[in-house]
Image (spheres, rainbow, N blue to C red):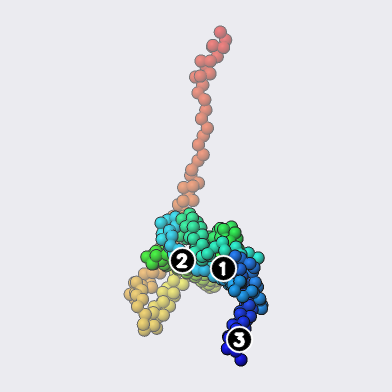
Amino acid sequence: MNPVLIIFLVVAFFIFMSSFFTVKQQTSVIIERFGKFLSVRNSGLQLKIPVMDRIAGRVNLKIQQLDVIIETKTRDNVFIKMKVSVQFKVIQEKVYEAFYKLEYPHDQITSYVFDVVRAEVPKLKLDDVFERKDDIAVAVKRELNEAMSTYGYDIINTLVTDIDPDIQVKNAMNRINAADREKTAAEFEAESSRIRIVAKAKAEAESKRLQGQGIADQRREIARGLVESVEVLNQVGINSQEASALIVVTQHYDTLQSIGSDTNSNLILLSNSPQAGSDMLNNMVASFSASNQVGEMMKKNTKKVEKPKPIQPQSGYEDDIQPDVQQ
């Protein structure tokens, strides 16, 4: 076989094979003919004219993400670094615009993100930046959609994924937070102490009230017993004064006996001489007699007091008035 024919057939075979190409899923291919746009080919097996047509480029239709790190300052002059993640994709119907109108889409998106963030963040204080990061993301998305839709790009979502202040600012914020929590803890501890003190005071007051009530009941029962004892003694011919004196002397000796029976007692009863009982009895009898005498004298003095007489008018005034009337 002629070698020239063989070479021709080989070249023809490669040219024929080069007219077929495949396009992957979620990808578009730009076909140019002699440097001029011809068509957009989607996924599958495609055909082009060898030598005349060529593949100018491939456009990815998947959702892509671009992370933009921006340094800016807040309204209260705190410098922060923000990380904004932009999720975007090429609109399938606008592959031509995405390929021919915009050469570096990442740079374009980065510029718009810088512009929006540096316009929004200086209006906010540092605390507001953390609280309103979603508003910043919405503003970035709105601005990017208006700008990038012309170039065939659709902004799916924008996220403020990180806000990083200076390390000294973060330490100060941590100290403020710790101090605030310590203040809250101190307030709760003070309130707890107050509740314990109030509860203890109420318990002591209730204890004192019950103790006083018990003492009152005890004295009431003692008085009732004394009355009954005096009545019993009166029935055998002992008057009230003698009965009271006898009861006092009996209690005195009962107290001495109870003190003597307790070996660990440190109570001292004054006076504790052998004549203490008789002295106490004589003093009580004398005091009872003196009190009765004072009562009788007060009754006598009350009877001697007379009511004052009313003041009568003088007769001389009447004599002076009558001659004037007759004239």
Task: Verify CB contact (< 8 Å) between mark 2 and mark 3.
Answer: no
At label 3, counting other C-alpha atoms closer than 10 Å, the crowd grade (few under 14, some 14-19, many 20 or more) is: few
Label located before the other in sequence (3 or 1)? 3
Say what amino acid the circle numbered 3 marks.
Answer: Leu
What is the quadrant of residue 65 in the picture? bottom right
The reply to whether callout 1 and callout 2 are in contact (CB within 8 Å) is no
2 or 3: mark nearer the eye: 3
Q: Nearer the viewer, mark 3 or mark 1?
A: 3
Q: Earlier in the sequence, mark 1 or mark 2?
A: 2
Q: In the picture shown, does residue 191 fall above or below 304? A: below
Q: Mark 1 sits on what residue?
A: 87
Label 2, secondary structure: give it: strand
The amino acid at mark 1 is Gln
Decide which of 230, 100 is in the foreground and name it: 100
- Gap in angstroms between the C-alphas marked 2 and 3: 62 Å
> Residue furthest toward the top?
327
- Could you give the CA–CA distance between mark 1 and mark 2, rounded to whole angstroms? 15 Å
Q: Earlier in the sequence, mark 2 or mark 3?
A: 3
Give the structural element (helix, strand or loop) at label 3.
helix
Residue situated in front as seen by the camera: 34 or 88: 34
Mark number, residue 69: 2
Q: Mark 2 belongs to which amino acid?
A: Ile
Q: Position of residue 316 (x, y in %)?
A: 49, 19
Q: Nearer the viewer, residue 234 or 102?
A: 102
Q: Give the residue at mark 3.
A: 5
User: Badge 2: how crowded within 10 Å, few (<14), some, or many (20+)?
Assistant: some
Looking at the image, residue 73 sits to the left or right of residue 19; the answer is left
The residue sitting at 62% across, 82% down in the picture is 12
Q: Quick one: which residue is furthest to the bottom in this view? A: 1
